[in-house]
């Protein structure tokens, strides 16, 4: 009675974890509330008559920390969200009713890794390097992968290796590599559903420039309704040369929020 | 170049969302920090020179609120966690290094719905009703489904309809229907990987009894290493009579936590 | 070289604590984020080489929980704050720059207790009872106390005894005793600087009425610039018949907030 | 009917605010949860039928951030708190029942400013400078102030000027000036009730040394039961040459916490 999907699952799957572990002290943008986890109750604090005990947690966090997805409501341009929605009126009672993260459908879709340093023959890209349209096209060609409408495009810069270093990953002084307006425009023209990268702000940041300009966010979130996933771990995927896979991403269904922590998976038959 | 999984995905999937929306004020156990979401920055608060603006969020929450998974570290018995790990020593530096939620592998597995009121010919079960082993076996037989080792078993009581009512869902005075020690022992003997239910504490709560005794938690988490998922929404699944499916659950990778909010999916070819 | 104040202090003071202890689970309005305290680090979690260890805390809370003060920015009427400030424009970058709690100067002022049940010869007032202007005047006369400009008036209803009972203190079904528009108008005409009460919302709440109408808040915060202190513990003060005292209240200096938890003192020479 | 204290208050008081404003982004130790403030509800989000509206706040914070007081439970040495209390057993159910911040009585006491750079003829002390016993004694002599049993001693290094600079105030690389074991031992011998400073960790930190050794904390909190106040603003007091005053400090009454944010005052007749 099992279906085709159950049959494939029964055949064995390899799950590559694309999410960062959520740890107190991990690098994050100072614009967002810090991730913090603590145990209000530990075993032994309160013991029931039968010898049982339950421990529990408290979390405080921004939604744009660790690996996370940006809802369309995250960014506005000239007072408008995607589709021309008024950025002020979209927020009702303190919730982005329009384009909040609760409006993102869970994704099980084809994903494509664009291993740009792999294409360029570099271990990783330098801070501030802009990934060009030619880089994107060359990478896809070398990999033998083609983007199709509805795909999720994950762009590897190699910068993700710095996640364990803390502040270096944020890249304030050095800048951060990534696509910019041109790359975003070209990717949008391919009809992708979502894009991700292994950096904190997805797109290129100029050395010393911080987040003063984020044109790829505008192109994707405001102009094209394409979701952005940040702070991915793409190293294992690249090391295993898995360029095409099934991408699984399930945002938390937080009513009215502008983003959600996520733990995306790249899945291939084992 | 696509693989078998991509082919199935390309054929179209139906995703049934088993998670509750995270909303301020939703019912939850008073033992856990309340879920709260707020927008520190709204559009218009800070506008960049180029006319762009970003809104963001702050979340405070327990991990055992909304739809969530219990890590094995959540419950101890007589000072021991699963496998005999010392409940005190398993917590290093304020984190459950042993059996924390970061040790739960993402799940893409066969799932089985046990629609118990469907079997019994009732709209839903009453507060305090204990789902017996005979109920579980009868339900599986009527549905034509059989549990196999590694499956995820989702037990529907119909109590989930009360989620929108708030306090009634918690069931302090009324009690809550569910399996108890016998049901848990039998399910464990079937080799299941995880179990879930549409109630706040997964197992039967006696009227007025609160959480004073949680034998199914002990059987699953401490004695058998079987994960528990709580506060699922199983109504759509039951209404569509989807009893067998691919179950997708990806916990947040929170280092050392005893649980995580999750948004599980039941997936079938469209 | 000591001054007159130091001399009085050296003579000995009696400090009567008017604040409630902040405890997880204490009664509070569901409109505000719940108070929660937890210990991320306990002794023994991290021990320094020299054998020392530090424990620490994490707090999450609304500002209108426990004993607290309302800043003028807390309430608006028809889009205006006190002095006609625009309620929207007063919030800059997500902070009430105008009339936020950071604008309240610490108070060391004369305080007057109005022990209304003491005047009426009752143990305490019933839910929904409106304290009238005649009650206020009669109380002051019986006590031999007169309000002067700049004073702080603390109105005891006796309802504070219910704080330990939890939900009963919130008074949803029962209502809560207190002054209403008339009492507030008369108190404002006396030139008081601030007013307080032993109830959760300061003013009278009708049985079953909740917070749908709060006319005394409007009279004080919006029309007269008089601060409101809520959830005071006035029992010890009444039991000791201390009707006149030095009132000490120091709000946390939270930039842009609408309120602050406080622990006010009534001080008299020992 | 007024008392001596009311008479002094009526004569007019000067209140010097010794607390830092609590602002998102202010410098703090990375060991403690970050201070964060946000407005879940702003005016206009929810408007009552009568045209009224209430805005409110959510705060997340450590207790050792901004100007704050350390409870005795904050530090242990060799597993013991002050008075030999067992550091493990003092924590019951996740609260420091013994020596928590709820056990600190509000303070209205004589305070003495020790303006060390004023004595040394320097604008301020350098990072890593150890304030010696001779410095303390010389400062008191030059000022014509003498410590008495029960006093609160506030030690100015001038480092507080860096609070507005952010990271520089934390002093990781530079170290921070302050007393160390010798100064603490001598101050304890004078019978002081509490001590404070204008730095983040109260005592001297060696350049690059961080918080690896905190001997003055041990001497005060563990061996002598003397409270410590950190991150004070002592600049106005020094500029006005107010060396003797009435010190007012009221910790939040947080059950079981190891510290509390505070806003202390130095008060003198106007």
Image (cartoon, coloured by chain):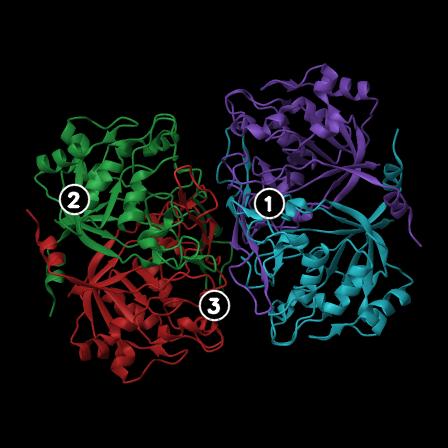
Chain colours: A red, B green, C purple, D cyan
Q: Chain of mark 2?
A: B
> On the image, numbered disc 1 is attached to which residue?
D97
Residue C191, percent from left and from top: 77, 32
Residue B265, percent from left and from top: 23, 48
The front one of C87 and D121 is D121
> On the image, numbered disc 3 is attached to which residue?
A212
Q: Residue at x 11, y 53 (%)?
A: A6
Q: Residue at x 58, y 63 (%)?
A: D29
Q: Chain of mark 1?
A: D
Q: Is residue B102 left or right of residue A241?
A: right
Q: Which of the 4 image quadrants contains residue A175? A: bottom left
User: From the viewer's perspective, is residue D26 above or below residue C167?
Assistant: below
> On the image, numbered disc 2 is attached to which residue?
B112
Q: Are marks 3 and 1 on the same chain?
A: no
Contact, mark 1 vs mark 2 (Cβ under 8 Å): no
Q: Nearer the viewer, mark 3 or mark 1?
A: 1
Q: Secondary structure at mark 2?
A: strand
Other-residue count near label 3 (Cα within 10 Å), few / some / many at <14 / 14–19 / ≥20: few
């Amino acid at each position: 009675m099992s279906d085709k999907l159950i049959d494939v699952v029964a055949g064995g799957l390899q799950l590559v974890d694309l999410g960062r572990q959520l740890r107190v002290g991990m690098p994050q943008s100072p614009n967002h509330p810090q991730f913090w986890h603590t145990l209000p109750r530990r075993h032994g604090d309160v013991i029931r008559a039968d010898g049982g005990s339950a421990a529990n947690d408290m979390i405080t966090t921004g939604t744009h920390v660790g690996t996370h997805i940006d809802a369309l409501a995250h960014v506005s341009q000239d007072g408008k969200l995607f589709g021309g929605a008024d950025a002020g009126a979209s927020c009702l009672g303190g919730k982005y009713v329009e384009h909040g993260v609760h409006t993102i459908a869970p994704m099980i879709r084809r994903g494509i890794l664009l291993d740009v340093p792999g294409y360029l023959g570099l271990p990783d890209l330098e801070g501030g390097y802009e990934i060009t349209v030619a880089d994107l096209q060359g990478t896809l060609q070398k990999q033998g992968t083609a983007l199709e409408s509805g795909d999720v495009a994950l762009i590897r810069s190699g910068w993700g290796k710095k996640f364990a270093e803390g502040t270096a990953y944020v890249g304030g002084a050095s800048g951060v590599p990534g696509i910019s307006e041109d790359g975003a425009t070209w990717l949008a023209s391919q009809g992708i559903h979502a894009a991700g990268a292994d950096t904190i702000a997805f797109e290129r940041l100029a050395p010393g420039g911080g987040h003063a300009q984020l044109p790829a966010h505008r192109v994707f979130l405001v102009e094209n309704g394409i979701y952005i996933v940040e702070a991915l771990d793409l190293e294992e995927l690249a090391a295993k040369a898995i360029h095409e896979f099934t991408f699984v991403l399930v945002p938390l269904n937080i009513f009215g929020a502008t983003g959600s922590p996520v733990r995306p998976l790249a899945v291939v038959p084992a």
